[in-house]
Image: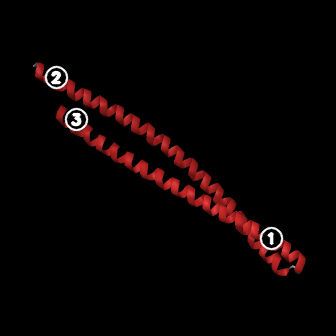
Amino acid sequence: RDEERKQWRLLNDAFMETKTRLASTLADNTQHLASVEAMNAEVKSVTAERDALLVSLSSALKRAEQAETASAESRKTELEKSMEKEIQLESQVKELSDKITMQAAEIVGRDKVHADNEALKKTIGSLQE
């Protein structure tokens, strides 16, 4: 009888520990998801800015082709600056994409822990039956 109570207490302790770990994992995953969503929004913003710059570059290029010598050189300088800005933005997009990939890998790892915890809960549940 005491042995049975001891085993039930151990199972209950294991269950509570698993429940606590699951709650912690859920909180971590929620926090990481919010972080990934924020980075995704930033990537979209940078991408929109880059797209707007591409439109501007295209327009500037057409004007530069039609311009005469001095003004053409001035517009060429403008275009070069825009291209440098685009290269910087593409670099930022790549960095943010890499961060998102790393965050996603962390979330997948946490999901694995969550799946392991779920399997443990099922095992405990079957042991309780």
Three-letter amino acid code at the position of disc 3: Gly
User: Which residue in the protein does label 3 denote?
Assistant: 125
Quadrant including the N terminus: top left
Q: Is residue 129 visible?
A: no
User: Which residue in the protein does label 2 denote?
Assistant: 6
Query: Which one is closest to the eye, mark 2 or mark 1?
Result: 1
Scheme of image coloration: secondary structure
Q: Report crowding for label 2: few under 14, some 14 to 19, many 20 or more residues within 10 A (C-alpha).
A: few
User: Which residue in the protein does label 1 denote?
Assistant: 77
Which residue does the image show at 78% across and 72% down from the upper left?
59
Quarter where residue 52 is shown: bottom right
Query: Which one is closest to the eye, mark 3 or mark 1?
Result: 1
Residue 24 percent across, percent down from the top left = 40, 35
Disc 2/disc 1 C-alpha distance (Å): 80 Å
Which residue does the image show at 79% across and 77% down from the upper left?
62
Three-letter amino acid code at the position of disc 1: Thr
